[in-house]
Image (tube, helix red, strand yellow):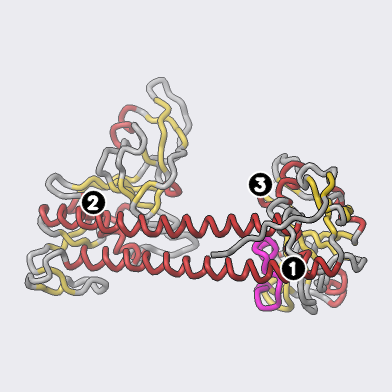
Amino acid sequence: MIQQVSKRYDAYRDSGVEWLGHVPESWTIVRLKDLGFLQNGISKSGDYFGSGFPFISYGNVYNNTISSEKIKTLANSTPEDQQAYSCKRGDVFFTRTSETIEEIGFSATCLKTIPKTVFSGFVIRFRPTTNDLVAEFSSFYFSANILRRFFINEIALVTRASLGQGLLNKLSVLLPTPPEQKAIANYLDDKTAKIDQQIDLLSQKAKHYGELKQALINETVTRGLDKTVPMKDSGIEWIGEIPAHWEVKRVKELGNLVLGKMLDNNQGSDKLLKPYLKSKNIGWLKVTDSNVEEMFFSPYEIKLYRLKKGDLLFSEGGEVGKTAYWNDEIEECFIQNSVHKFTVNKNSYSRYFLFLSFAAGRANYYDNIVNFVSIKHLTKEKLSRVVWLSPPPHEQKAIADYLDQKTAQIDAIVETITAQIDNLKALRKTLINDVVTGKICIL
């Protein structure tokens, strides 16, 4: 467990900056423009990229990956470009433009000069001209979550959020003495590394349980619960042998498929405004987003596209074959044409086929039956020909009930692990905020 120090500095004063609050009395506060200068990045057409020299992208800054090992994009930059848009130790890069305010002002600090590198026009570079800032301290200070308050409060969102040099120059910078900055950076390096190690271990643990869940589902939906029954070759490469009394059928033999309605907001006298799902609302095994949109449906369309409890939903594009179970999440809901609705025949059990589809999808089974052009689609015709296993109805139910119980237990464990990871990430943010703003003293 990471122990956080609670020692405070001897004296504090009001910073005069709302989002900073009180700061150590011995620390100075300056504006960013007092420490150096800003420059927007280079903007070029597509043929400028693909080969050549390192290019710092928006993603490198947003994900804080400014290093020669992590910069993957190349650009055909000239020596003049490389001189004008260089990347030196101590440079701080900020995300300049985005669709949302929340993605503006993320930073990454260069801790080692990267020769012959240029940076994106979607990024602003701050270059220090004094010795007041220690690069390692900059890395923590400018990436501190507390700075989000400054950017979110100050940036006006019109059609696209943008961070101008004038605003960024006004950013308040807290300056301990250089020796204090080095001590703070060393302390945070040590503590965040330990937190990151714990997060990594927990993430690996969650991944292991995810793989265990997948293996359990794959084994159970293709072999059944009784391991003593005679087996036969299924004729399906990714499955292999199955119980001898099981059948192999195409989807169209097991139920009814309907592809959702094309987007249509034409309001007629007989049409009603109804909520609908599209592929983004579908996660593996469940509906993941209840914030649905609405469009108009005629009486015939209401009957055709309405979801009923037990229906299976398939994503038609994107992550092909992603499948969810409709359990009346919304009192009345319909489907748009990025979603297939599958209603199983009487005496079949849809939750068995839900788990079977999960196993098939994770084996990239659906990827193998769709055409790849620029976008892949699982058409109704192709989905109807997908081969599925069909145990007797009572076995379908027994398998589904067993998997409901077992996967719920695994999901609960993963949920606990995820909560622990979230707590550690929150601790990491709080620790950095408190140390770089002097709320706690590490000396």
Precedes in sequence: disc 1 or disc 2: 1
Q: Quadrant of residue 388?
A: bottom left
SS class, disc 1? helix
- Give the image location of residue 292, x and y in percent: 45, 38
For label 3, the residue is 100
407, 137: nearer the viewer: 137
Residue drawn where x is 48% and y is 58% of the image: 420
On residue 258, the disc is none
Q: Amino acid at mark 3?
A: Thr
Q: Is residue 311 left or right of residue 273?
A: left
Precedes in sequence: disc 3 or disc 2: 3
- Give the image location of residue 3, x and y in percent: 60, 63
Residue drawn where x is 33% and y is 50% of the image: 324
Q: Amino acid at mark 2?
A: Arg
Q: Is residue 268 left or right of residue 189?
A: left
Q: Residues within 10 Å of mark 3 (few under 14, many from 20)?
A: some
Precedes in sequence: disc 3 or disc 1: 3
Real-space Cα distance between discs 1 and 2?
53 Å
Q: Is residue 70 magenta?
A: yes
Residue drawn where x is 30% and y is 30% of the image: 300
Q: Is residue 113 above or below residue 253?
A: below
SS class, disc 3? loop
For label 2, the residue is 351
Q: Is residue 3 left or right of residue 417?
A: right
Q: Which residues are magenta?
A: 58-73
SS class, disc 2? helix
- Give the image location of residue 230, x and y in percent: 7, 72
For label 1, the residue is 185
Q: Quadrant of residue 17?
A: top right
